[in-house]
């Protein structure tokens, strides 16, 4: 059974930084694509792609809204994926979810339906 546990969310001021962590149990993450999604508050909001990282080093994809501000990384020795968030904006406020693919060495998908395992989410709130 694969479990993903996010941590590191909280309250930040605009322009500030946070680092989210996603620790996995039940599987070694190194061979699988991992991604971060977020879901903003409000009715009808979808879970939007933020960043993804493939098993092959250097393969990362970012949403246009976070390029140059966020960075995704993985530490295979700790079986953990990180999302480094800088220059935060109020519109970054959302619940952030970690996701994992179940196919080894797969591409970095941006559609949440392509991921098989999800964490419970961590709240990030950015004040202006």
Image (spheres, rainbow, N blue to C red):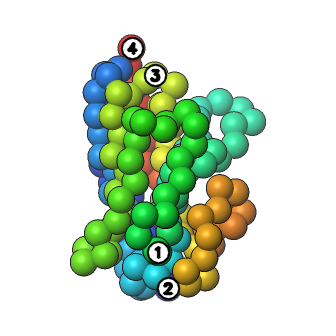
Callout 4–callout 3 Cβ contact below 8 Å: yes
> Of marks 3 and 1, which one's residue comes earlier in the chain?
1
Residue denoted by label 3: 90
Outermost residue toward the right? 44
Q: Residue at x 72, y 63 (%)?
A: 113
SS assignment at label 4: loop
Spatial CA distance of label 4 from label 2 is: 40 Å
Residue denoted by label 2: 1
Outermost residue toward the left? 77
Spatial CA distance of label 3 from label 1 is: 31 Å
Q: Residue at x 50, y 43 (%)?
A: 95
Q: Residue at x 69, y 37 (%)?
A: 45
Residue sitting nearer the eye, 67 or 42? 67
Residue 124 in sight in this render: no
SS assignment at label 1: loop
SS assignment at label 2: loop
> Of marks 2 and 3, which one's residue comes earlier in the chain?
2
SS assignment at label 3: helix
Q: Dot 4 surroundings within 10 Å: few (below 14), some, or many (20 or more)? A: few
Spatial CA distance of label 4 from label 1 is: 36 Å
Tell us which disc is closer to us: 3 or 1.
1
> Of marks 2 and 1, which one's residue comes earlier in the chain?
2
Q: Residue at x 28, y 27 (%)?
A: 16
Q: Dot 3 surroundings within 10 Å: few (below 14), some, or many (20 or more)? A: some
Residue 128's disc number: 4
Spatial CA distance of label 4 from label 3 is: 6 Å
Is the residue 74 above or below the residue 95 in the image?
Answer: below
Q: Quadrant of the C terminus?
A: top left
Instruction: Locate residue 17, reporting x and y percent.
Output: 28, 34
Residue denoted by label 1: 55
Callout 4–callout 1 Cβ contact below 8 Å: no
Tell us which disc is closer to us: 2 or 1.
1
């Amino acid at each position: 059974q694969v479990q993903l546990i996010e941590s590191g969310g909280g309250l930040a001021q605009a322009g500030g930084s946070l680092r989210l962590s996603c620790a996995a149990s039940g599987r070694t993450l190194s061979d699988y694509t991992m991604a971060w999604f977020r879901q903003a508050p409000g009715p009808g909001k979808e879970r939007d792609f933020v960043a993804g990282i493939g098993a092959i080093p250097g393969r990362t994809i970012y949403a246009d809204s976070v390029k140059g501000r966020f960075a995704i990384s993985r530490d295979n020795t700790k079986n953990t994926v990180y999302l480094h968030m800088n220059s935060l904006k109020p519109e970054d406020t959302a619940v952030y979810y970690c996701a994992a693919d179940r196919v080894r060495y797969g591409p970095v998908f941006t559609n949440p339906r392509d991921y098989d395992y999800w964490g419970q989410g961590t709240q990030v709130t950015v004040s202006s």
